[in-house]
Amino acid sequence: MSKLLIKHLTKHINGTIVLPASKSINNRLLVLQQLIGAPKFIEQSSTSEDTRLMERALAQGNGTIHVNHAGTCLRFLTAYFACTPGCEVILKGSERLHQRPMETLVNALKQLGAEITYVNKEGFAPLHIKGKKLHGGTVYMDASVSSQFVSALMLIAPVLTGELTIKQLGKVVSKPYVRMTAALLQKVGVTCTIEQDVVVKPFVKALDDKLAISVERDWSGAGFWFAMAALATQCNLQLSNLSMQSIQGDKIVASFMESFGVSYTATNQGILLKRQQTILSEAYFDMLDCPDLVPPMAVAMCGLNIPAVFTNVANLQVKESKRLTALCNELNQCGFKVSHTENDLVIEPVNQQQVNMPDFFNTYNDHRMAMSFAILALKLGAVVIKDAHVVEKSYPGFWNDLKLAGFEVETIED
């Protein structure tokens, strides 16, 4: 797939969308299933590229393992292979993945007895890992870069020889993902607390051979539909089987967007989105706990022409792309006014007559960029998305779901 031309002639969004299963939940369950045999069954599994990569890596178990752009896979598998006696792997990925920091996790694992060396550049993948039995203890970890470092340690804690205590240092980002990991550990019978410190005890309970866990529908994916609802002129959209009782922190998008034209109602079928008229005249969002929501919400604020500040977004520069830079580059070429500091993304109002469709939107090998810029078809009339296949990472059915909601999606060959 080279490029996609996205249009929506009526700007009325209607229908029922079945969101993908959460890859974040699924990948955590896969590691636990491999380490302790629980849950026995994972139901409604994710079909995302990240989950397929995780499944293949766990099945391979030795040799050179390539995880493409998947940061979650890299972090979780580093911990998994480090605590698996007898395995020896070279863990590598894309060029961009090799630019994303790993030293915090590697140092913590070495404190627990891990044998890990850097193949090329100190502090970054590729990694050479020789698996061995690791001990418990207390580790100090900078939690200001990625919650995945903390979750990776939590996931292997059940097979350590003693209790693990993680003392988180710095401004802790994405705390809901740590709470998600804790909730899943508790579901499979692992004792875990996440108060001042994170404490996980070794797994000692008898296995429940019938334990099955269904993977929740993805609230991060839902964020794109909330942004679309904000830019639609009419909306009557059912997000099937999505629940406000979710363990996912990104469900906060519902309360964020309620002040900017989107009403939501929990039904027996899921979450119903409608367009409403009440919209605040300016926006201030603290995104420390939910950075993945920044791209679609930033696009929505641009489309609504609402001045907005997104704060605590520094770690977006170490995601699949340098997301702050990517958002500024692509949105400014349309005539929007977007800038960023180290910790803030700032959107200023513009003359709407100066906003135009660019030749195409770059996606930077980043699934969230592709899906976010597609939303602007509701504002600009049409958009062209380059390298649209990148949505496979988390939401393989995104382009088909757009069609179900009334969008026209056409392939353009180079």
Image (cartoon, rainbow, N blue to C red):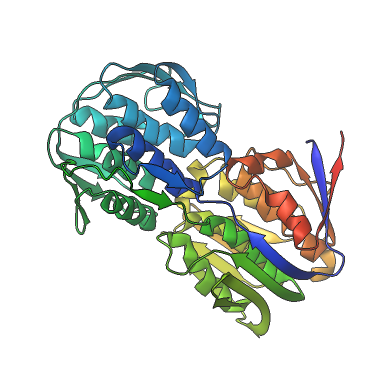
Give the farthest residue toward the bottom. 278
On screen, 344 above or below 54? Answer: below
Residue at position x 15%, y 36% in the image? 136
Of 321 and 61, nearer the camera is 61
Residue at position x 58%, y 69% in the image? 308
Q: How many marks?
A: 0
Give the farthest residue toward the front. 210
Q: Quadrant of residue 196?
A: bottom left
- Residue 299 visible? The answer is no
State the image coordinates of residue 358 (x, y, percent, origin top left).
82, 51
- Residue 176 visible? The answer is yes
111 vs 69, left or right, is: left
On screen, 180 above or below 64? Answer: below
Of 214 and 127, nearer the camera is 214
State the image coordinates of residue 144 (x, y, percent, origin top left).
35, 49
Q: Quadrant of the C terminus?
A: top right
368 vs 206, left or right, is: right
Q: Quadrant of the N terminus?
A: top right
Residue at position x 66%, y 55% in the image? 372
Residue at position x 52%, y 31% in the image? 53
Of 44 and 222, nearer the camera is 44
State the image coordinates of residue 238 (x, y, percent, origin top left).
64, 69
On screen, 309 above or below 282? Answer: above
State the image coordinates of residue 28 (x, y, percent, origin top left).
39, 43
